[in-house]
Image: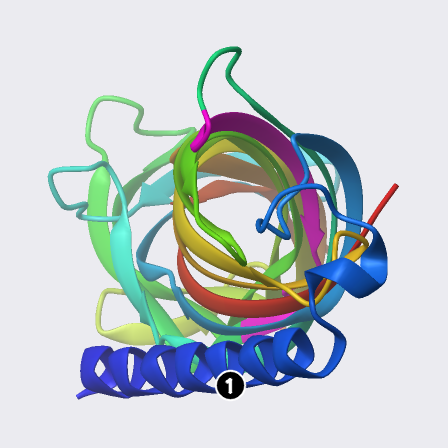
Amino acid sequence: MRTLKFAFLFQVLLVLTASTAAWAQSEFGPSEFGLVSDSLVPRSAFYFGLGTNYNSVNIGNQDVIAIGTSDVISSGTTIATGMADGPDDATGGTPIFMDAQLNFSPSVELGYFRHFEGSEHRLWGLKFTNDYLGTSSVNRDIRLPQVGQFTYASDPLNPVPFTGNAVATSIRTDIVDQLAFRPYLGHSFESGFVYIGGGPTLTNMRTEITDLVGFADINGTRGDISGAPQDFSDSGWVWGGSVEVGVTHFFCQSWFLECSCVFGITANHQFNFDSTFSNPDPSDPTQVKAGTLVGSSTWQGITQSIGIRLCKTF
């Protein structure tokens, strides 16, 4: 259904673009701009464009790893140590599904095209784009299953197994903006050109985990191990790639409208987090649980966009 919506919207954009271009050409005509040939497409030009995209951003599953270590300290002496992590899937983490998002976003581009020497219609070009995607996906009430064991200092040869959960209020993923460089090849007509291209992308991505607490079920009793809830976040620029198919319609040699479809995908990227905790035992003021919370979140972004931009040549 989402694919059909994109296809329908793209057809509407093409019809509007073609109608606008035909009106401009009928109103102004090539001769009013002093063109030598009948084509409104320059032999070569730099151009700058502003417009908007309609985006589908899909993150799918992110694989989350959470590892907790702890020491039970009584009056300054460590009396037990323990560690827990998750029963993971094949990728090494607990899969957390993130819903796909639809949104509109602003788009800026700077480009150049040039016809091949000796060719009336074939051309090459390149463009640099900056798309502010500004999209977020949130999954709430997260439970990461845990298994582990602890060992008493007085009986180090007999570790005690236990199960538990790392619980978080929410996990959020953000794709902030995306930079892209795409060379392309095209074919020009009387009032525009079509093109196809592709190239690398650099995407600003971010993960946030809110109110994470580690719990353990030991000997049938559920206990809070890590104490107060903790927040984690990490961000980074991630390499990827994209392909684009587009069409342009020139009003004159100085102005044109561009419509395009873009498919992009980022590399799988691992976001890391770590923290320490100290959790006093409310029933025994001489005891405290102290340890670490360490983990990661691995995911990638897949984007599909339909865009329309008004461009000025110079």
Q: Residue 125: give x, y in percent of width and height.
A: 57, 28
SS at circle 1: helix
Front-lying residue, 285 or 280: 280
The residue at the far left in this view is 90
The residue at the far top in this view is 117
The answer to which image quadrant residue 217 occupies is bottom left
Range of residues picked out in magenta? 120-136
At label 1, the amino acid type is: Ser
Q: Residue at coordinates 55% horizontally, 79% vertically from top-left?
A: 22
Q: Which residue is mark 1?
A: 19
The answer to which image quadrant residue 9 occupies is bottom left
Total numbered labels placed on residues in the image: 1
Q: 302 left or right of 170?
A: left
Front-lying residue, 74 or 56: 56
Q: Residue at coordinates 62% horizontally, 46% vertically from top-left?
A: 41
Please tell me whether residue 98 is drawn above or below residue 13 in the rendered image.
above
Check residue 133 for magenta coloring. yes
Name the quarter where the C terminus is drawn: top right
Check residue 39 for magenta coloring. no
Q: 158 left or right of 175?
A: left
Please tell me whether residue 197 is drawn above or below residue 107 in the rendered image.
above
Q: Residue at coordinates 41% horizontally, 84% vertically from top-left?
A: 15
The residue at the far right in this view is 314
Please tell me whether residue 294 is drawn above or below residue 51 in the rendered image.
above
The answer to which image quadrant residue 45 occupies is top right
Q: Residue at coordinates 54% horizontally, 68% vertically from top-left?
A: 307
**Does residue 169 appear in the picture of this structure?**
no
Q: Residue 101: give x, y in percent of width and height.
A: 44, 78
Front-lying residue, 301 or 181: 181
Q: Residue 164: give x, y in percent of width and height.
A: 30, 63
User: Badge 1: few (under 14), some or many (20 or more) residues near its Cα, within 10 Å?
Assistant: few
Q: Tell me how the rendering is colored.
A: rainbow
